[in-house]
Amino acid sequence: MSTFELFVLSAALGTDLFSVAIPIGMNRIRRLVILQSAAVFAVFHIGMLLAGYHAGHWLGYMVEHVGAYHIEWPVTTVENCAKIMGALVLAGLGVNMIRENAVGSDHSGNINPPLNHPLQGITLVMLATGVSLDALAAGFSLGMIDVDLFKLSAVLGGVIFLIAILGLGLGRKVGRCLGSKAEQIGGSVLFLLGCHIIWATL
């Protein structure tokens, strides 16, 4: 694949991340957290793509030597599972954001500062896994063709890193405008997005 094709592929794999990063960024996340989270998203995308690539490469080897030519169904299965699992993570994260916002409201109606943002600990790991599962399915298909893994990893990591920064940064600016309602709106968007993905996949 050419460098241009790799950029297009990477941008396509980052569309889900961008749509998710905006509502998450509404939590008024610090710039350092945005940079750290973008790096985590990039690493997870690279890892998932390489895992899928090696799995697809192994399947291609088996097809060549065993003669099992009906290989389309595993790709479809992986893609559907990736979408459903990612959607469940998004919906769960959205509910958690809404719940934390409600709990953080004191009796006077003021919202406590969002110290427990979603981009930390196990929540960040689950989120990064959910938005990078499409890369697993893409890597599965790429494993059957000749691809420069080093170039692919470098391009994908760079593009995903930039997409995450843009999405989270944009959400951060929107969150400033919306104030205390930003977390509720962001959580609602994530929940509805997850439900929509599940409905479309099923």
Image (tube, rainbow, N blue to C red):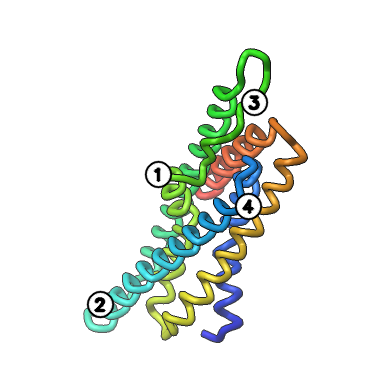
Residue 32 coordinates in the image, percent (x, y): 57, 53
Residue 64 coordinates in the image, percent (x, y): 28, 83
The residue that appears at 52% across and 54% down in the rendered structure is: 37
Relative side of 77 to 119, left or right: left
What residue does disc 2 label?
62
Q: Earlier in the sequence, mark 1 or mark 2?
A: 2
Q: Which amino acid does the dot numbered 2 rest on?
A: Met
Q: Quadrant of residue 180?
A: top right
What residue does disc 1 label?
122
What residue does disc 4 label?
168
Above or below, 179 against 138 in this view is above
Question: Is the residue marked by circle 1 packed among few (<14), some (14-19), or many (20+) residues within 10 Å?
Answer: few
Above or below, 19 against 27 in this view is below
What residue does disc 3 label?
111
Q: Which amino acid does the dot numbered 3 rest on?
A: Ile
The residue that appears at 51% across and 85% down in the rendered structure is: 1
Question: Is the residue marked by circle 3 packed among few (<14), some (14-19), or many (20+) residues within 10 Å?
Answer: some
- Residues tagged 4 and 3 counted as in contact (Cβ below 8 A): no
Residue 161 coordinates in the image, percent (x, y): 56, 64
Q: Which amino acid does the dot numbered 4 rest on?
A: Leu
Residue 193 coordinates in the image, percent (x, y): 59, 44
Question: Is the residue marked by circle 4 packed among few (<14), some (14-19), or many (20+) residues within 10 Å?
Answer: many
Q: Secondary structure at mark 3?
A: loop
Q: Earlier in the sequence, mark 4 or mark 3?
A: 3
